[in-house]
Amino acid sequence: MSIRISPAKGDNLFSNYGLLVLVGFAAVAAVVWGPHSFPDALRIPVGNAFEVGFSSFAETAPWAYEPFAAFLEQTFEGLLTTLSSISPVILSSAVVLAVAHFRGVKLAGLTVLLFAWVVLSGFWDYTVETIAFMLVAVAAAFVLGILVGLIGSFGPRINAVVRLLLDAMQAFPAFAYLVPVVFLFGMGNAAALVVTVIWALPPLARMTSVGLRNVSPEVVEAATSLGTSRSQLLFGVKLPMAEPSIRAGSNQMIMYAIAMATMAAMVGAAGLGAPIWSGLNRLAFGDALQAGVALVLVAVIIDRASSPRTVKRSTIIQRDGSLSWRKRLRGLFRAPYGSAQICLALFLLTVFASQVLRGRWQYFSDPPWGVPLRLREPVEAAVFWATTTWGPFLDSLSGLIQTYGLNLLGSFFAATPWVVVVAVTAAIGILTIGKVQGLFLGLGVAFIGCLGMWESTVLTLTVVTVALVLVILIGFPLGVLMAMNDTAAAIIRPVLDVMQTLPIYLLIIPAVMLLGVGEVAAVLATFIAAVPPMIRFTNAGLRGADNEVIEAAQIFGARPGQILRQIRIPMGLQTMMVGLNQALLLALAMAVVSAMIGAPGLGANILTSVNRALLGTGMEAGIAMFLLGVVLDRLFNGCARFVASAQHASMTKVARKPNDETSSVPATRATAPSH
Amino acid sequence: MTKQVLSPQPGRLRLPTEQTRIPGNDPSVAGSTIEVEDLWKIYGPNPTRALQEYRSGASYVPGHMTAVRGVSFQVRPCETFVVMGLSGSGKSTLIRCLTRLIEPTAGRVDIDGNHVLTLSNSQLSEQRRRDWAMVFQHFGLLPHRRVLQNVAYGLEVSGVPRREREERAHRMVELVGLSGTENKYPSELSGGMRQRVGLARALVQNPRLLLLDEPFSALDPLIRADLQDELMRLARGGSQTSVFITHDLTEALKVGDRIAIMRDGVLVQVGTPEEIVLNPADDYVRRFAVEAPRAKVVRAATIAQAVPELSAGLSVDAALTALAQNGGGSALVHPNARAPFVVTAQDLLKLDGSRRTLGSLEFGTATVDGDELLAVVMQKLIDTGRPVLVKAPGGFMGAIDDSLAVRALSVPSSS
C-alpha cells in the first residue's frame, strides 16, 4: 500500500534546462581543457589499494577462505579418483541409463553421441574431470545459493542489500573474477572451483528469493491461520511452493557454472576447457573445435537434463511421501516405466561385456583400434579452403568493418573530449531516468577515467558498438523472417537454442577460424554471441501482437506488409528493445572474452593481469568493465522507456516491468522468451 | 444458550431437514463468544500518532490509511455473524485482526474470555491449531499437496499422528462431497471443488470459531449457491461460531443470523437480516436493502395482521355485518371439531344460503409458523387462493392476504 509520488510537470522542464546547461558547460570545458584524453592528474590509485588490501588480507586471514577452497579441492580430487577408478564402460553406461530413465531416450541418445565423440577423440579423462568438477562446483553453489536466497527472503531491507550484492556480482565480468581468485589461491583447481562457485551462485540465489517471496500470501495466511510455526512455514509451505523457481534458478546456475568451468581453464582448471584453451593458444582450431564439440554436447545435455521444462510431473510428485518406497520401486517396473527394465538389462550386459573384454576396453582414453578421431587436419583443410575460396570476400568484408566501423568509430571516440562524454552521459541519464541517477551515471563514467582505463574502455566500446550495429542489421531481418515464416522459425529456433546454451567462450572458435586474430575477428565473435536474443525477441515481439488488433486491421484490408509495419513492429517494439538490451549485455561480456583473439581494450588488460598476476590492473579493468556495463544498461533502459512513453503512452502493454529484477541484471546469458 | 432458541434459522427452504453431524465433532465443545471493543487498524508510518489524532477528533491524517476505525461488536456462541461491505471497506482487515493474522493498532478482542491481543506467539499458535480455522477467498490451498494432505495439513501441523489425521481428513473429504478426489492436486480441481477442500480443511480442525473471508466470491453463481447450502448444512451440524465476510447482500441474508454492514472501516448497522432490510439505518444501507430479495428475508410474523375471531355459531349475515363494522377484510373462524380457517367478505357474499352458520362452512386455509419466510407464505397464497394464517404460541397472531404480501414485497420509495 505504498503511495507512489509521480514527478511534477515542472521536473521535466528543469531536466531539459539542466541538460542545456550541462552540454554548454561541456562544450566550453572541452575547448578550455584542450586534451581529449583523460588527464593523469585525476588518476585514483584504486588498483594499488586493492593490491595492498588483498596482500594484507592474504597475510593475516588465510583461515577465512583457505578451508573452503581446500575443502572444494579435496572433494574434487576425491571424486575424481573415485570416478576414474570405475571402469569407463560401466561409468558411461550408467550415465546413459540414468539419463534414459530420468529424461527419456532422446537425451540418452545424445549422451551416447557425447561419449562416442569423447572416446574417439581421446578426451575421456578430460570429460571425467569436467564431470567431477561440475558435480563439486554445482553442489557447493546449490547449497550456498539457497542459503543466500533464504537470507534475501527474510525481509524487504535485507533483500535490497542481497539484491544489490547479487547485481554487482553478476555485472562484474566473469573474466575479471579470475584475477583476485588467482591472487589468493594461485593457479589450479582450487581457484577454478572457487571462482565457478562464486560465479554460478547469484542466479540461484536470486531465483530462490524471488520464489520464496512470490509464494501466494493467501496460502501463507491460510497456513498461519492453522497455527503453522515459522520453520514449518518455511519447509512445509514456502520452499515447496518456490520449487519451480528454484529449479529454474538451478538450471541457470548450472549453465553459468559450465561457462565458468570452461573459462577457468585459463587458470589451470582440469576438464574439457583445457584442450580448448591450449588449442586456441596454439591456433590449432581443429583441436579446439574437437574439444568444443564435446563441451557443446555436455552443455546441451546438462541443460536439457536440468531444465525445469522437461522434468516429468511424476518425479516432482514423488516427494510428498504419499507413496511408499516399495510402491515406487515397483512402479519403476510397471508399464510407463518399462524402460527401467530395458535399462537394467543393458546395464548388466555392459558389466558383463566389460568383464569379458577385460584390459582392452578398460580405458576409453585408449580405444581398442587405436585410431582416434582427429579433426585437426580436416578442419585446417576446410579453413584453408574457405580462406582461399572466399578469401577476397572475407578480406573485403573485414576491410569494410575495419574501415567504416572500427576506424571511423574509433576516431570519432578519440576526437570526443572526455568531458563531453561524461556530460552527455549525465545529461541523457538526467533526462531519461532521473536527476540523481543521471549524475551518478556521469560520475561512473568519470570514474572509469580515474581508474586509468579511459583508452581501453573506448576501444572496448568501439568493438561492442560495431558488433551491435551488425546485430541490428542482421538480427532484426532474421527475427522478422522467423515471425513471418513458420518454416524459417522451425529452422532457426533450434540453432538459437544451442547457441544460447553454449558457454560464450566457445563462440570465438568460428570467428577465429574465419577471420584469424584481431579486432575484426573480435567483432565477429561478439556479434555471434549477441545476435541470438535480438532474433529471438524480435520474433517474439512481432508474433506477440494482439490478435484482435491484427484482425481489426485485416478487416480494414491491411496487407501483410502494412500489418507488419503499422501494427506488429510498433506493438512489439518494447519486446525487441528487451532483446537488444540483452544483446548489449552479451556483447559486453563477449568483448572481454574476445581479448583472447586479440581484441584490444579492457579484456586485454584483464587477460594480461590474469597471466601475469597483476591484481591492481585486473581489478581496475574489471571495475571499469562493471561500470561500463551498468552505465550502458541503465542508459539503454532509460532511453527505451523514454522513447516508449513518449511514442505511445497509451500502449501500456509492457513486455516486462522496468524494475523486474530478473531482467535488469546484466546477465551474460540471455533468457529465452516463451515463444 | 443454544442456537435454536436464539434466533430462527433463515433460508431453511432448500435444506434437508435431518441434521448432519460432523464426525469427530465434540458436541460438548461450544462455539466461541467474541467481544470486540474499539478495534483500530491504521496503516502508515506512524499509526500510534495517527490513532491519537483520530481519537482527538481528526477526520483525516495524511499519509495514513485507516482500514478499521473503532469497531465494536459481539458475536454470540454458535451464531453466524456476517460482515458485509464493499471492497475496501475494511472487512477483510477486520476478520484478520480477530485472530491477529493482521496485528491491530489498538482495541480489545476477547474470544472466550481470552484477550487475543495479549496472547504470546506460542499461545496464539496453540489457539489457531486448536480452536480457530479460516476459509479464504482464493482457497489458499497448498499446490504441492494432494487434497487429502491439504485437508490434513492443520492436523499435521498440530502433531496429530498420521493415521488418525488421514482418517479424519478422509471422512471430512467425504462429508464435503469430494470422495474420490483425495489423491488429486488442487490444480486438477474446479474452483467449487477447491473451495470444498478449503472448507474441509477448516472444519476438520473441529474449530470453535470458523472465519470465512469471502469464501464463495470467486465462484460461479450456481456453485456458490451449492456451497452456501453446504456450508449451512455443515455449520448447523457443528457447534462453531462463524464470522462470515462477504460483499454480497443476498449471500449475507442467506447465511447470516446477524449481519453487520461495514463502510469505510466503521460498522454502520448490526442486525438480523429482517432488520437490515426493513429498517435500514441510513441511505447507504438502504441502497443495499432495496436490492434484497425480500421474499427470502421477511418473515410471516412481521407482516401478519391481526384478524377478529368470529364465533362458529354466527350466521353468514351476522358475520357480514360484523366484518363491515370492522372495516371489511377477513376474520378467523375456529370451529370446535375442525381446523380453523379464514373467511372474507367476498367469500360470504358469494354464498346463497345466508342463514347458514359459519361453523358449517368449509374454506381450506393454510397455516404457517411465525418465522416462516414470505416466499413460503406466497406459495401457499397461490396454492389455496386464500389468506394464510400465521401461528403464534397458543393461538394465531393473524393472517396474511394477497395485498399484505404484495405490500411487504414492494420497496418503499425513499422517504
Image (cartoon, rainbow, N blue to C red):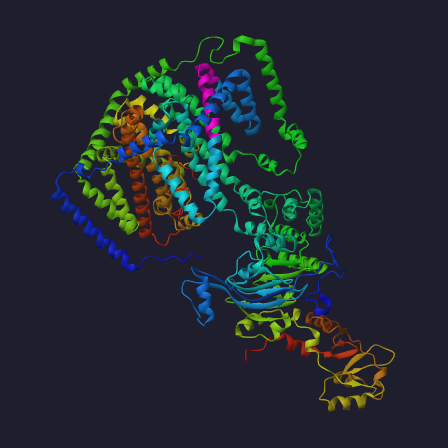
**Frontmost residue, B7 versus A465:** B7
Asked if A364 appears above or below A30 in the picture, the reply is above
**Frontmost residue, A590 versus B52:** B52
On the question of residue A675 being in view, the answer is no
Asked if A166 appears above or below A18 in the picture, the reply is above
Quadrant for the C terminus of chain A in the image: top left
Quadrant for the N terminus of chain A in the image: bottom left
Relative image position of residue B303 (x, y in whole percent): 68, 77
Is A122 in the magenta? yes
- Predominant secondary structure in magenta? helix
Asked if residue B43 lies left or right of residue A510, the reply is right
**Frontmost residue, B334 versus B229:** B229
Asked if residue B355 lies left or right of residue A5, the reply is right
Which stretch is magenta? A116-138
Spot the residue most to the right: B337
Which residue is located at x 36 percent, y 21 percent? A277
Is B382 in the magenta? no
